[in-house]
Amino acid sequence: MQNAILEQAKLNWAVKAERLVTAESNIETDSIAIVRTDNNAILGVHGKGYHPLQNLEMMEILDRISGKMDLPLHKGGFFGEGQKVYVQLKTKDQSVGTDLVKGYLTCVNSFDGSTSLAFGHSNLTISCQNTFFANYREMANKVRHTQKMHERIDLICMQIEDVLRAEEKIFEQIVKMDSISINEPSAVLLKSLKAKGFASVKDLALTRILNLEKEERLADLSTLSTRKKNILSDLEVNIMGEVQDKGGNLWGLFSGITKYTTHQLKGDSNENKLFGVYGRREREVFAELGQLIS
């Protein structure tokens, strides 16, 4: 199975470490370049103590984890020229209204130093293929690039169990969001919003996802840049459609945000959601909505 995933994900390549030399005198330095062996693309530069985790080694680790924890290998891929690579394992599914939310454990490794081997939960909403990386972070659930990584399978499994427990809480919040009306919000919800300075939950979500400054106001479009006005317009269209489809609830509002970030942001949506600013803001909005309804 691991070879099939490597083929499907186009991760069937290796890297090598090449010592860098000075341009003037051709003297070796203490730095190494991590280079793909199939096309000589330079993926990162590190100190001489850095030990790259090969894609095949990562798959061997994940294959052992898959068997140990009964989490089937799903699919993988890479970003850029291979600076970051990822593989997903299947977790659980959750029905939410008319949606089926599929859960995955996403494992990310890098050759550019941007992340160690790290794990996080992501989900895919089947109705419109929206993706939300709910709790990806370089957490305790990361493993540094050392020669002893294979010896730490049990530790990795313990950390993955933390991710799976967090997944349960994420699904619980999604189900609760599906039951909360934003068209007719409760007095408790309105009170919580008022304490934060917002008249509606949509205003809160839009303010956070757009990262509005104090002088920028949704009620006065002249205070927004042209770029933010365009994003706001697209977000409102997506939110309106999802809220109507899902019965006027909080899950519909958040689904409108994930629909925009999945399908309309430029670039690779998965990379944006894992490492980009909108992925981070999306996670912050989800967390704040959870606090509002807790």
Image (tube, helix red, strand yellow):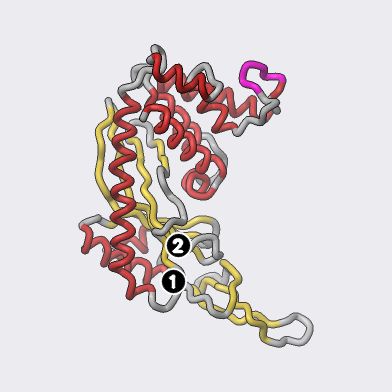
The residue under the point 34% across, 36% down is 125
- Image disc number at residue 109: 2
For the residues labelled 1 and 2, the Cα–Cα distance comes to 8 Å
Is residue 33 one of those drawn in magenta? no
Q: Quadrant of residue 132?
A: top left
The residue under the point 38% across, 36% down is 129
Q: Quadrant of residue 159?
A: bottom left
Residue type of the residue flagged with mark 2: Asn
Residue type of the residue flagged with mark 1: Leu
In this rendering, the answer to whether 34 lies above or below 65 is: below
Q: Nearer the viewer, residue 6 or 53?
A: 53
Q: Is residue 293 visible?
A: yes
The residue under the point 36% across, 63% down is 6
Q: In the rendering, at what x and y percent does residue 248 appear?
A: 38, 17
Pick the quarter of the image with the C terminus.
top left
The residue stretch that appears in magenta: 217-222
The answer to whether mark 1 and mark 2 are in CB contact below 8 A is yes
Q: Which residue is mark 1?
A: 53
Is residue 219 one of those drawn in magenta? yes
Q: Nearer the viewer, residue 33 or 220?
A: 220
In this rendering, the answer to whether 34 lies above or below 122 is: below
Q: Nearer the viewer, residue 35 or 272?
A: 272
